[in-house]
Amino acid sequence: DIFMSFRMPLFFFLCGFLCYKKGRFSQTKTIIEFVRKKFIVQLIPTFIFIAFYSFLFQQSFGEMWLDIIEGGYWFTFVLFFYFLFFVLFFSISKNFKKHSHKLFIFIVGTIIIYFISLFSAHPSCPWKNYWASGFFSIALYKYFIFFVFGVMVKWKYDCFILILEKRWFLATCLTLFILLQTIFLSWANTNGLIYHFKDAVINPILGYLGIIIVFSFFNRYKASFSQKTIIGYSFQYIGQRTLDIYLLHYFFLPRNLSMIGHFFTQYYNPVVELLVGLFFALMVVGVCLVTSNVLRISDVLAKLLFGKVIPPCR
């Protein structure tokens, strides 16, 4: 439950952090090229893998696309729309000279998208059961607030690091994280107004706090995660193949593990369960990397399946 509170926010924070680059969106030509590349990388591979997955596991291709989680492949699909939202807000903000006005455009636009996504998941939402709501995964746009946070951190990186280095700031974040986690878990079975408050307010705050804590950890021990260390080199190699792992891992997820599930139901031990989970996770990551390297032998497959840029022939 603790990891779940900041797992997806952290993913989208990193996407926003890596998306922003000074001067990248200064011209219309570069914006169009950016969207074109993201379409090739995010959507085409997703379409191919959903088609293959539906065929292999005998599921309806159409139902997978109309499902809000796209049969599990919602991340890359939703991320493409995040890029479009970002480009839209950036293009509007270019008409303003003051940084405060530019920031205002992003904040207002992000808040609107956040509350539309929350309303889309509400039972009284008029478009909740429409095919477009599932196809566009509108209810999952709630993570866009963390994508924008990643952009803002990259934009004002030096200022963010200065804040992180203040001892009181990190101590406050850790204290609030523990306190809010306790409240969140104690309200696990609540309904009504408390449930909506927990979902709309406490959840995003936990996401932001979790991101700051993880970021602070890696920033403080960044020397241990450089390419000169085995751990750092491994992490960076995996980081360069995250798209491959995401697209492939559904085919290799362990199934029929009811025996292990029953064991931990009878002998509850979260630490041992975490270690067992990490073992299976590393095993799946390893198989995905091997499969990815085999597929990438072919430049054509590397481009179609993973959006690899193929240099022109001389």
Image (cartoon, rainbow, N blue to C red):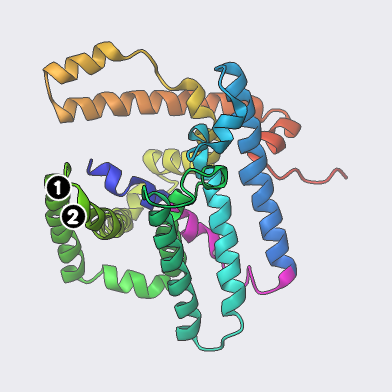
Please report the residue visible at 12 percent of the width from the left and 50 percent of the height from the top: 182
Camera-nearest residue between 26 and 230: 26
**Residue drawn at point x = 67 percent, y = 49 percent:** 39
**Disc nearer the start of the sequence (1/2):** 1
Q: Are marks 1 and 2 in contact (CB under 8 Å)?
A: yes
Q: For the C terminus, give its image quadrant.
A: top right
* Mark 1 crowdedness (10 Å alpha carbons): few <14, some 14-19, many ≥20: few
Q: Quadrant of residue 176?
A: bottom left
Left or right placement of residue 162 versus residue 243 in this view: left
Check disc 1 and report the residue beneath it: 187
Q: CA distance from mark 1 to mark 2?
A: 8 Å
Where disc 1 sits, the SS reads: loop
Relative to 95, is 147 above or below?
A: above
Closer to the eye: label 1 or 2: 2
> From which residue to which does the magenta span run?
12-28
The location of residue 70, given as percent across then percent down, is: 52, 36
Outermost right residue: 314
Q: Nearer the viewer, residue 152 or 107?
A: 107
Residue 22 at least partly seen? no
